[in-house]
Amino acid sequence: MIFGLNHTLLTVAFGSASLGAVAGALGCFAVLRRQSLLGDAVSHAALPGIALAFILTQSKEPLTLFLGALIAGCLGAIVVMNVVATTRVKSDSALGIVLSVFFGAGLVLLTFSQRQPGASQAGLDRFLFGQAATLLNRDLWFMAIAGAVVLTTLVVFWKEFKLLAFDPVYASSLGFPVRALEVLLTALIVAAIVLGLQTVGVVLMSALVVAPAAAARQWTNRLSTMVVLGAVAGAVAGVLGALTSSTFERVPAGPAIVLFAAVITIFSFLFAPGRGLVWQTINMRSRHKSLRADALLVNMLDMEEQHAHDNPEHAHSTRALKAAASVTGAFDVRGSLENLNRRGLVTKLPDDRWKLSTTGTEHASELTRGENIGGTPTS
Amino acid sequence: MSLTPPNPNLAIEINDLTVAYHEKPVLWDVDLHVPAGVLMAIVGPNGAGKSTLIKAALGLVKAAAGDVLIFGRPYPEQRRRVAYVPQRGSVDWDFPTTVIDVVTMGRYGALGWLKRPGAREHAEAMAALEQLGMQDFADRQISQLSGGQQQRVFLARALSQQADVYFMDEPLQGVDATTEHAIMQLLRSLRSQGKTVVVVHHDLETVEEYFDWVTMLNVRRIASGPVSEVFTRANLRIAYGGRSALGAEALERDEIRDAKPAAPIVP
Amino acid sequence: MTSMQLEIMLIAAVSAVACALPGVFLVLRRMALMSDAISHVVLLGIIVAFFFTGDLSSPWLLVGATATGVLTVFLVEMVTATRLVKEDAAIGLVFPALFSIAVILVSRYAGNVHIDTDAVLMGELAFAPFDRVVVGGYDIGSRSLVKMVIILALNASLLLVFYKELKIATFDPLLAVSLGFPVAALHYGLMTLVSVTAVGAFDAVGSVLVVGLMVGPAATAYLLTDRLSRMIMWSAGIGVVAAVGGYWLAYLMDASIAGCITTMLGIIFGAAHIGAPDRGIIAMARRRARQRVEFAQRMLVIHLFNHEDSPEAATENRVDHLGEHLRWRAGHIERIVDSARRRKLIQEQNGSLTLTDEGRTVAKESLQFS
């Protein structure tokens, strides 16, 4: 017992963490290569492979089912690519066909498998929505090892995969076998999907490929960091979802994991520094504020220069400045003035009048020369 | 191979190159001999096969016939001596990577499998960036670059390949004046180092100013040779056939010499 | 054949046609996977509406589910508009999240109600005939059949009324906008139809078969014809064949009906992919082979033409050297030279090839000379 978790829960947590990490890491490549929806087709396509593997071997060994799913999933991906390459049918339709046809064939095979003698407990239908609580120790070991193999391959061919994802044509000009690399990368993505089927289910597994990667993308501008963050996000969603499913009655693991992944994604879309929507809004506000301040300074410089000969000490009232600003938009002139005052760029004089300070004059003349636009400091 | 023995003094020797997409010809039987140390423009109307010529030379599209020799030997053997600058629009500039990272990719081919770029590759990439005045942008995310800066990054990447022959697909397309200036300076310095640079170019008005060699293309090769001999009104008329507004406009321009017979195949 | 079997087939066939009609436009607009998203997400609308009404047969369920389908489309567009992710990722984010909520709600709170998450995917076609609609003591058919006939009528009539508008908005949206067609309204109208159809077909055939019936026949028809009107006919026909064929397949193998119908769809698509008269693999391979000879002949005459008056003509244009120049195999070059000679494009004089006038014309035409 660690932190009040018993052995079963630990097994579940560890298993879900590893599948989430693998899906999150490989998902980055799927998302960046615009193959987000390939995962949906592949995970559905794996179902007949699982059923057939069981029918042929009568075994529910994780490796057997994994291989069946892997082969069927890869076959689905190959069919999609082949249809797109050789016909006028576009990728969205090809994905839709593979998804429904393979899944339908899988359903047919499932009905057969359930009719097999001694298969009453086959429970292959847990592959539809996933079940975390059924994870056994042997599943765990298998997931950890298979996940490690997938991630190691990713690390070994890191440089090539990165190049492939960013600029495949250039990769080809450097002499890399782009086609073979594509096949390998797709196979890794399929493997990552297939690993999660038992826990997350075929229907929702694709979300665990897309969501952590989409979330991770918002926090970083480096591929390596993105992949690590994607793995972490996937693992966190996996653990939280699986534990929720194991703790509460009648909460299937797949939907729970997907919902946690969705929450992480929404949070990232909103709050990730720089790219997040909240930050974008704040940045835009402050940019507007700064531009307003710029405009005000330039106006003041203009107006003061008109008085340069007769009265160099001439200051202007807020009302006059508002009137002058009305050409460019008089929004919040007083606020901008107070702000500039705090920054020492303008001086507040009695009778609600304002004058540029020495630094303010300097800054304003820089602006009129077209330098440092948008650089007026605001608080 | 050709009956005339391959000429190792030619940087690029293309013989009878035919490329077809779905059996629809894009290039017909193109011969092209480019001596080392020239700065060559490939011009021609849209759909003339300019980009395809480059891609076929680099083995990026399959040729239906013909062969490509780099310094007298087949391209795959000479891959390390050739660098490619694809069109800027061919990649996703929102990809999570930095400028220095992209430029370092130029070293990947020489690094080979399994090896990681290290300090040496980093230094080579920095040197390439410096040549384009982009060293201050090394750690910038690529989505934060202007179009001209993106183009300079692509050029730096090719530069870091330290090749002898450069194929560039419209490097001057849609870039600002500063970038155009920086790029032309770089191309001239490459030429002065004896490198051969082949540029797909759109702007007929700058051909004479920027290049010393030109190939005019319209599905077949119309003419190829020194700009002073080949860039003639007659050849432009053949290449553009009066169908292209750009070509027609150029034909009216005074700078372009009066009609001359098409120059002989060079050399 | 019992009347029940007949009724099941009828439900499947009517659903197939009802799905095929909007499906054609989804496929042409490259939005085939919206059917996947919508057909799953309608479950959320059904369950939420059920919580409010407490009645599984309330028409509000249909309204709620349709609204959720349209909401999904809207959410996907919204996420795409943030430009934080690409559109494919946006679809892959939105619908699994909404569907997950629905599945959890169903399994936690509606476990004792007649909604079953497995049935969501596969439908219960075999049981559909038991649920009858009785009006004034008169049995007019099973609920699913009545519902699907109504939806089919709706789809068909709206399609007829807005055929021209949908057509232009699909093939050239920019032109449609410039002509003043309400493209956005048409888009959402179509998505509403997809949602209504998905909801209606949902409890009978399940979400996966909805995807299959919307995408499969339309994509198959896309391989068979170039005309929109024919594509719609073909889709409807293929849908019916798959539905009926799938039913009998299921009957013979005693397997899932929905599964067998999608399997039939796959078989029909595969057959079209291989054997379609114009765009099938076989037809294309034949055409390629024919074009290759023609192309090679043209290559040959152009080669001769390019070197015709040049000093190297004597060496370039010899039969025994052509293969080296054009990098053709030995047998190939002879075949092409033979066929070109038969077409009187070239003539041979002591091992050297020259163009005939006709050959020169072909070469010039190929090079777009006037």
Image (spheres, rainbow, N blue to C red):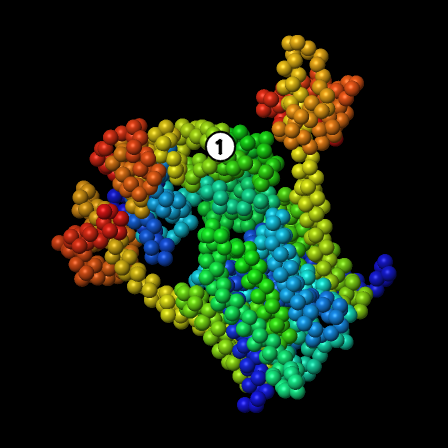
Chain letter of disc 1 in the image? B
Q: Residues within 10 Å of mark 1 (few under 14, many from 20)?
A: few
Q: Residue furthest bottom?
A: C2
Amino acid type at mark 1: Asp
Q: Is residue B154 above or below residue B136?
A: below
Q: Measured from the top left, where is residue C225 in percent x and y?
A: 40, 67
In the image as oriented, which residue stretches furthest toward the front?
C136
Query: Can you give x and y, in whole percent of width and height, for residue A300 in the image?
Result: 67, 21
Image point 67% across, 26% down: which residue? A323
Residue at the disc numbered 1 = B176
**In front: C234, or B216?**
C234
Could you say where residue C99 lies in the image, as x and y percent from the top left?
Answer: 68, 64
Q: Is residue C340 left or right of residue C238?
A: left
Q: Nearer the viewer, residue A49 or C77?
A: C77
A44 is higher (above) or lower (below) than A237: below
Which quarter of the image is occupied by the N terminus of chain A? bottom right
The residue drawn where x is 32% and y is 34% is: B250
Instruction: Inspect this view and state whether residue A323 appears.
Output: yes
Q: Quadrant of the C terminus of chain A?
A: top right
**Residue A8 in view, yes or no:** no
Residue at the limit of the structure toward the left, as seen here? C349
* Circle 1: element type: loop
At horizontal 59% and vertical 35% (from top left) the residue drawn is B138
